[in-house]
């Protein structure tokens, strides 16, 4: 009792020794920062405004000589070339060619890679033996091999598909393998305690468990596959948007470079959106 | 003699022991344990962590090959064979991509029962044992108690006579735990399975069981078996009768006087 009393007294002394005025005034009054959300149309209007502003500035700049119209081209010239590209040029052949090599590479790389990653579940020894090779292949700049791929697979579609496949395959393999490694050993224990065969564990546990991992790389892979296809076309090709860009650059047709890049971006966005949609459907299907 | 013992008991463990090789030398996780459980009995194993309860379960379920001894189920040597007993692990391990119904039929499905038939068999049981309305939901929509119910029904529907339950209610809150104990007793009375139950909760062990086995560490072993002769069906106030309290005191005494647990704490 007495001990407590003295400690309380000491405490009182301590507070009394502080200047009372400072503790009253020194503390600034602050409120939680607030941010009001703009309505949807305002955001959209701002986005469109920036785009129009940039194009207008580009056009004006080129017309008034602020930037070199020959190297940078100008929106009006690009628009004219765009119309010509679609009406007189072989826009659709190029788009179809690039689209096809991308899609083939995407599906081949993703499916082979996923199966490869899943296969590591079957044997730890096999996984341990193969792993360094996978890591080697991953760290290797695969695009550096592109000239060799063109030599082996020729100038046509096959070489572009091969490069796109090489780029996507490793990502899918490693991600799926990460899924396999994240598998809870208790889950396997449960299946085996129910008398399951290895094939049953694989089909009913390992594959559904790894599906979210497999799906998560789809969006990355579509971009990689497109990169692979374009690089293949840069090196040697008779068709494709990549070839169109290279050709236009070599002939100083800068407007055409911009047109091809524009079309390519549109293609990329469309494919990205399609894959996102596919991903949503698949995720709904497995209901995580 | 062993043969006759095995035949009389539903589950007979004959001197099963487990020694692991470690870099520091052999480590005896489980000293030879002999145990006979008759058909329809409910027994519990209690003891501190590392006393070999899970090792016994893994051996009986065929997931671990014992370094000595044999496991007999209905007198038949079942050492190292999987799929002979129902085994419910501590985690409920419900597959998130399957509905409750499809989770519950997993055992039948693996055993090759056609899906339609398995579902038809499971549905009335789900409804009868408190999962009505949850049949077509995914496990993430269920509370902890409901998930344990589903996991237990999955174990039961696997349709083996012996089931092993490894701390099934360990992660539940006290209120839910009491409900689940009643639920389990009802289920056990209906199905007449032979149950081996592992728990840390002495009161739970006594309340549920016909016999409580107290275990000790280093090496893991059974030090005493205490029969519980409180008549069934038991009511909650059975936990207050002198016999119950006497057993509880004896169990706590055995558990707290464990000299190795003191040396561990020191």
Image (cartoon, coloured by chain):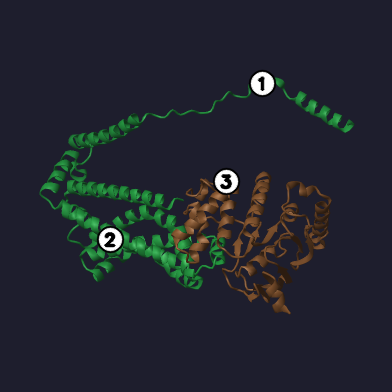
The answer to whether the residue labelled 2 contacts the one labelled 1, judged by CB atoms less than 8 Å apart, is no
Marks 2 and 1 sit apart, C-alpha to C-alpha, by 72 Å
Marks 1 and 3 sit apart, C-alpha to C-alpha, by 50 Å
Same subunit: marks 2 and 1: yes
Depth order, front residue of B153/B127:
B127
The quadrant holding residue B13 is bottom right
Residue A250 seen anywhere in this rendered image of the structure: no
What quarter of the picture does the C terminus of chain B occupy?
A: bottom right
Q: Name the N-terminal-most of marks 2 and 1.
A: 1
Q: Which residue is mark 3?
A: B143
Does residue A11 lie above or below A163 as drawn? above
Q: Which chain did the image draw in brown?
A: B
Residue B204 seen anywhere in this rendered image of the structure: yes
Q: Which residue is mark 1?
A: A24
**Chain of the residue under label 2:** A
Q: SS at mark 3?
A: loop
Q: Which residue is mark 2?
A: A104
Q: In the rendered structure, find residue B255 and report the number of the disc placed on it.
A: none
Residue in the image at 35% along x and 62% along y: A111
Question: Most extreme residue toward the left, as rendered?
Answer: A88
Residue A85 horizontal/vertical position (percent):
14, 48
Looking at the rendered image, the disc whose residue lies closer to the viewer, 2 or 1, is: 2
Q: SS at mark 2?
A: helix
């Amino acid at each position: 009792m007495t001990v407590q009393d003295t400690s309380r007294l000491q405490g009182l002394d301590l507070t009394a020794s502080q200047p009372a005025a400072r503790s009253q005034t020194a503390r600034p009054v602050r409120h939680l920062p607030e941010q009001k959300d703009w309505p949807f149309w305002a955001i959209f209007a701002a986005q469109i405004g920036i785009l129009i502003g940039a194009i207008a500035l580009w056009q004006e700049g080129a017309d008034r000589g602020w930037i070199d119209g020959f190297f940078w081209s100008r929106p009006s010239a690009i628009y004219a070339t765009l119309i010509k590209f679609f009406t007189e040029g072989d826009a659709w052949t190029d788009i179809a060619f690039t689209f096809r090599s991308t899609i083939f590479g995407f599906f081949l790389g993703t499916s082979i890679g996923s199966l490869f990653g899943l296969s590591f579940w079957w044997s730890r020894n096999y996984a341990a033996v193969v792993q360094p090779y996978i890591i080697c292949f991953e760290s290797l700049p695969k695009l550096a091999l592109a000239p060799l791929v063109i030599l082996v697979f020729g100038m046509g579609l096959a070489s572009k598909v091969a490069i796109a496949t090489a780029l996507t395959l490793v990502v899918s393999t490693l991600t799926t393998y990460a899924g396999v490694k994240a598998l809870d050993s208790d889950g396997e224990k449960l299946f085996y305690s129910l008398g399951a065969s290895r094939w049953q564990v694989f089909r009913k546990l390992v594959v559904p468990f790894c599906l979210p991992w497999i799906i998560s790389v789809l969006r990355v892979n579509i971009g990689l596959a497109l990169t692979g296809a374009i690089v293949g076309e840069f090196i040697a090709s008779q068709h494709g948007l990549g070839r169109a860009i290279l050709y236009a650059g070599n002939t100083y047709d800068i407007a055409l470079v911009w047109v091809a890049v524009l079309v390519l971006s549109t293609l990329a966005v469309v494919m990205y959106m399609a894959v996102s949609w596919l991903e949503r459907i698949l995720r709904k299907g497995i209901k995580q | 003699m062993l043969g006759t013992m095995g035949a009389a008991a539903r589950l007979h463990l004959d001197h099963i022991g487990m020694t692991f090789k470690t870099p520091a030398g052999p480590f005896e996780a489980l000293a030879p344990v002999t145990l006979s459980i008759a058909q329809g009995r409910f027994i519990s194993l209690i003891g501190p962590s590392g006393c070999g309860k899970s090792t016994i379960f893994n051996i009986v379920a065929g997931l671990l090959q014992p370094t000595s001894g044999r496991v007999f189920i209905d007198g038949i040597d079942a050492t190292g064979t999987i799929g002979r007993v129902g085994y419910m692990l501590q985690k409920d391990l419900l597959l998130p991509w399957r509905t409750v119904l499809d989770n519950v039929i997993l055992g039948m499905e693996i055993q090759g029962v056609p899906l339609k038939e398995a579902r038809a068999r499971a549905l009335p049981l789900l409804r009868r044992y408190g999962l009505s309305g949850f049949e077509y939901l995914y496990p993430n929509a269920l509370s902890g108690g409901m998930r344990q119910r589903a996991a237990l029904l999955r174990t039961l529907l696997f349709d083996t006579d012996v089931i092993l339950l490894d701390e099934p209610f360990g992660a539940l809150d006290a209120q839910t735990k009491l409900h689940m104990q009643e639920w389990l007793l009802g289920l056990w009375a209906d199905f007449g399975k032979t149950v081996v139950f592992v728990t840390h909760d002495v009161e739970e062990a006594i309340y549920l069981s016909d016999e409580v086995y107290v275990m000790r560490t280093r090496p893991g072993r059974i030090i005493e078996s205490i029969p519980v002769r409180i008549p069934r069906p038991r009511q909650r106030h059975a936990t207050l009768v002198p016999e119950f309290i006497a057993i509880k005191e004896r169990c706590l005494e055995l558990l707290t006087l464990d000299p190795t647990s003191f040396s561990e704490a020191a």
